[in-house]
Amino acid sequence: MLDGQRPLDEAAAPAAAPRDRAFARLIALTVLRRMGQLDRLIAGALPRGLPRGRAPVGHLLRLGLAQGLFLGTPLHAVVATTLALADETGGGRIKGLIDATLRRLAAEGPAQLAAQDAARLNTPAWLWQRWVAHWGAPAARAIAEAHLGEPPLDLTLNPAADGAALNHADWAARLDAAMLPTGGLRRGAGGAVEALAGYEAGTWWVQDAAAALPARLLAAAPGTRVVELCAAPGGKTAQLAAAGADVIAVDRAAPRLETLQANLDRLSLAAALVEADAAVWRPPAPVSAVLLDAPCSATGTIRRHPDIARLKRTGDLAALAEVQRRLLANAAAMLAPGGRLVWCTCSLEPEEGEATSRTAADTLPLLPDPVRADELPGLAEAITPEGWVRTLPSQWADRGGLDGFHIARFRKIN
Ligand SMILES: C[S@@+](CC[C@H](N)C(=O)[O-])C[C@H]1O[C@@H](n2cnc3c(N)ncnc32)[C@H](O)[C@@H]1O
């Protein structure tokens, strides 16, 4: 994944059994979350560097150490599986070195880890510097700390399920979840979502609490025609459809639209799906509500997808910001006068959020429509002086954090 610069979800090979697959994924996620710390330990144990050759010694040591030092796997199992993997990947001749390094760091690693600055070491320098510059040093550290652990599982209940009988408190109890002030449910991390009560019946879908805010802030009345741009895989489409809106969901990726349709089917919800470039597509007639969830660097979701911290580059941001500007301009153009637009990105980078919203307010026929505290119960801290929403992974720290989003709401000028 790292060598091929591919996202973890794409690179992960299907393993034999679901349990093995889940553990393999957990190991990979732990390596990604703790890579700076692991590499510092490895560099200390091998001061002359990694041996040259075919075998991916660095990756083998990272995988073994992640299990031994962070996942509680016994040393004998760590050594046995890592040496077997060394054999499979052409490292038969350096098994002695791998064995000795794993055993030495199993003994010395815990004390070294305790002395490390985990938040700083595990955050790529360019991201750390940007977050300090934009959000301040204490917030940057709190964000990086929020990235170290497994995030909770957030669920949005389907108001269309169970008819009028859907009861949040009952479902919270059934799912062993807490009720969030913004409306969703939150469970501890871990476990297969397909095995949870209500999955088959479509009683809920997985959606981070921050990702559930944009559709909520659009507040489309039942029967309203809503265009949703960049809709797949459909968390926000489901919210809009469940609220009774007549949704046209646009995305340019056909396979992702198929996933969106499958998600809607499980939830017994409906929307009209359109495969098109949202920067140029227009509905047959202007509409009164548009939701745009623009493609972005997704640095706000690093706690769920730690591979993003290793795959993205600072140079990606300008091109993404330009795409976002084009999408916003088209979104504004398809709105009827007085119509409402909510747009968002799951990025911690202001170029993909606050700066773009400011440009939109200055250059497009859009007036900011500030979000009020009563619309975000329990989350007033996320409302900015401009009336936009800025969530950070460090917010709701006592509840388990939030994905990082910028959300802005506008009205089309008559
Ligand atoms: C952040 S994801 C959307 C997540 C989705 N709104 C949800 O809540 O589940 C961005 C989506 O934008 C789509 N996309 C990117 N560029 C696009 C474009 N120019 N036109 C239409 N869709 C685009 C991608 O295929 C991807 O599905």
Image: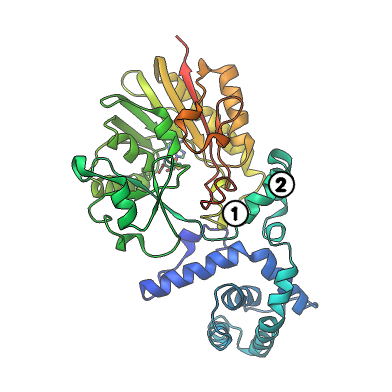
Camera-nearest residue between 315 and 70 = 70
- Image coords of residue 43 (percent x, y): 75, 73
Q: Classify 98 as above or below 13.
A: below
Going by the picture, which residue comes out furthest to the top?
414
Q: Quadrant of ligand 1?
A: top left
Question: Mark 1: which secondary structure?
Answer: helix
Residue 87 as seen in the image, left or right of residue 159: right
> Which residue appears at 69% of the width and 81% of the height?
105
Q: Is residue 140 above or below residue 413?
A: below
Q: Is residue 370 above or below residue 175?
A: above
Badge number at residue 293: none
Q: Residue at x 55, y 74 (%)?
A: 71
Q: Position of residue 216 (x, y in %)?
A: 40, 33
Instruction: In this rendered view, identify the residue nearer to me: 272 or 397.
Output: 397
Residue 89: where, in percent of width, then height? 56, 80
Image quarter for residue 339? Answer: top left
Identify the amino acid type marked 1: Ala
Q: Residues within 10 Å of mark 1 (few under 14, many from 20)?
A: many
Evaluate whether residue 52 shows in this view: no
Nearest the camera: 340 or 87? 340
Q: Quadrant of the N terminus?
A: bottom right
Residue 387 in the image: x percent, y percent? 55, 25
Alpha carbon separation for disc pair 2 and 1: 12 Å
Q: Secondary structure at mark 2?
A: helix
Q: Amino acid at mark 2?
A: Pro
Instruction: Identify whether 158 is placed above or below 250.
Output: below
Q: Which residue is mark 2?
A: 138
Residue labelled with disc 1 = 146
